[in-house]
Image (cartoon, grey):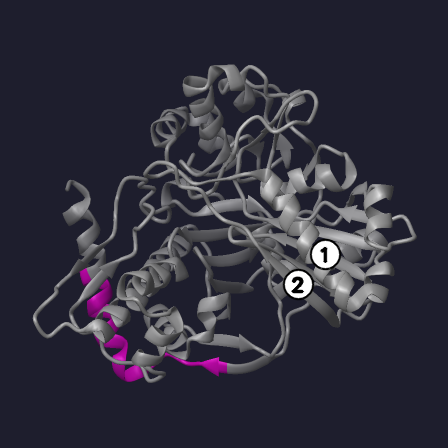
Amino acid sequence: MYLGLDLGTSGVKAMLIDVTQRVIGSATAAIDVSRPHPGWSEQDPADWIRATEEAVAGLKATHGAALAAVRGIGLSGHMHGATLIDADDKVLRPCILWNDTRSFAEAANLDADPRFRALTGNIVFPGFTAPKLVWVKNNEPEIFAKVAKVLLPKDYLRLWLSGEHISEMSDSAGTSWLDTGKRAWSSELLAATDLQESQMPALVEGTAEAGRLRPELAAAWGMTQSVVIAGGAGDNAASACGMGTVAEGHAFVSLGTSGVLFAANGSYLPKPESAVHAFCHALPNTWHQMGVILSATDALNWHAKVTGKTAGELSAEVGDILHAPTGVTFLPYLSGERTPHNDAKIRGAFIGLGHETDRTALTQAVMEGVTFAIRDSLEALKSAGTRIDRVTAIGGGSRSRYWLSSIATALGVPVDIPADGDFGAAFGAARLGLIAATGADPLAVCTAPETAETVEPVAGLTSAYDTAYHRYRALYPAIRGL
């Protein structure tokens, strides 16, 4: 048996698979996000441990014999978080999360240093880890002085699980300290933020062994053998492993809290000026590109909270059959935006409201706004040399047939719906645990699921969608100065 642990922004998911990759069971536990100031987003790492214990306890209650047979564990987690620990491995402050934008000034200053884009292949975004450490140095110098290690969220879980300070390439590529082409920490970039390599975890590939489960935890969970912990992956790369998006030409669109358009690459293809992320993949000698929008299902959840309805109720009101855009446009910049704008300060807007605009029209506009933001990512990926002919849809938002039809029509490519099953980050993490424990061929393990259905673009609405997209594109520069 193999266990995948996915540390998400809103919770931990634990999934058990067997050697044939059949899902045996899963369990989840919730985590809250603290927003003490506008633009801030934090979590207490103790909550990650509590949620992991709850999720594993849920598996033990329902699948105790299978849990006892675990040989390997894979880790996945939300990226970019700054988890700061002292020389005694004690947490110094709440973790600053990926969607925290307080360090936008520090990010701009680092990005102005040409070495960062040259070595990392990416813009220094406010959500990345390096500018957060500069913010801590500038605003909490007493904490910065005590930092012995900087860990990414899933790697703090690894520390608790194994006692090891280890990370891997896909997650570390999102820090602004990794030489992404060489797959190694850059001492030059670390020095530029007054840090050194000794304050970073050791690096392995995501498929490699990266510690063993502490005996006391193994005993508490009923495991009787030594359990290998894989390097694992950042959440998007882990999802790609779960979806089999590991070879050149494969792509997926994720409609989760944030939105991602992800394409696997056989070589390193950076183009930072497009605001496309060029990161290491979790498999050795592979890379990937992705466009990232900060609010996808989060935008619909915000709309649901405002209207007093659930996201499911709002989606049901829109229905399944795609409609032409109404003229109401929504800009989903509730937390700023990454691809293609790299703008931490921009905020969302409804444009084109009239007396006739009802709740259903607003819901349709929210879905279209997210769709058009994903098309922005497609255009950025094209400019970086990546061709996408079709995508597979994952994430909670992919349950909406309307949304998938909207994406297919706006992007002009078929959207594949995988056969029933959970092929997300927890499954990808479990696959990495299997590879690390058995030495299996990563490409033989990380295969794509069967396609249950394909959503084709609605040809009769292509022109209307193109017109609405160009209106959407014109709005960002119009409101940016406001």
Q: Is residue 168 visible?
A: no
Circles 2, 1 touching at the beta carbon (< 8 Å): yes
Q: Quadrant of residue 377?
A: bottom left
- For label 1, count other residues whose C-alpha is less than 10 Å away and answer few (under 14), some (14-19) or many (20+): many
Q: Which residue is mark 2?
A: 27
In the image, is residue 469 part of the stretch drawn in magenta? yes
* 299 w.r.t. 271: above or below: below
Tag 2: amino acid:
Ala
Q: Is residue 12 magenta?
A: no
Q: Is residue 225 left or right of 373 when viewed as pictured? A: right
The image quadrant where one finds the C terminus is: top left
Q: What secondary structure do most residues of the magenta stretch adopt? A: helix
Instruction: Indicate left or right for 420 with 478 as reference.
Output: right
Who's the residue at 42% across and 18% down the image? 138
Residue in front for this viewpoint, 259 or 442: 259
Residue 470 image position (x, y, % from top left): 21, 62
Work out whether 9 lies above or below 18: above
Front-most of 218 and 368?
218
For the point 81% across and 45% down, the residue is 217
Image quadrant of residue 323? bottom left
Name the residue beneath numbered marker 1.
56
Where disc 1 sits, the SS reads helix
State left or right for residue 240 relative to residue 473. right
Label 2, residues with CA under 10 Å away: few <14, some 14-19, many ≥20? some
Residues shaded magenta: 454-471
* The N terminus: image quadrant: bottom right
Q: CA distance from mark 2 to mark 1?
A: 7 Å
Res 142 visible: yes
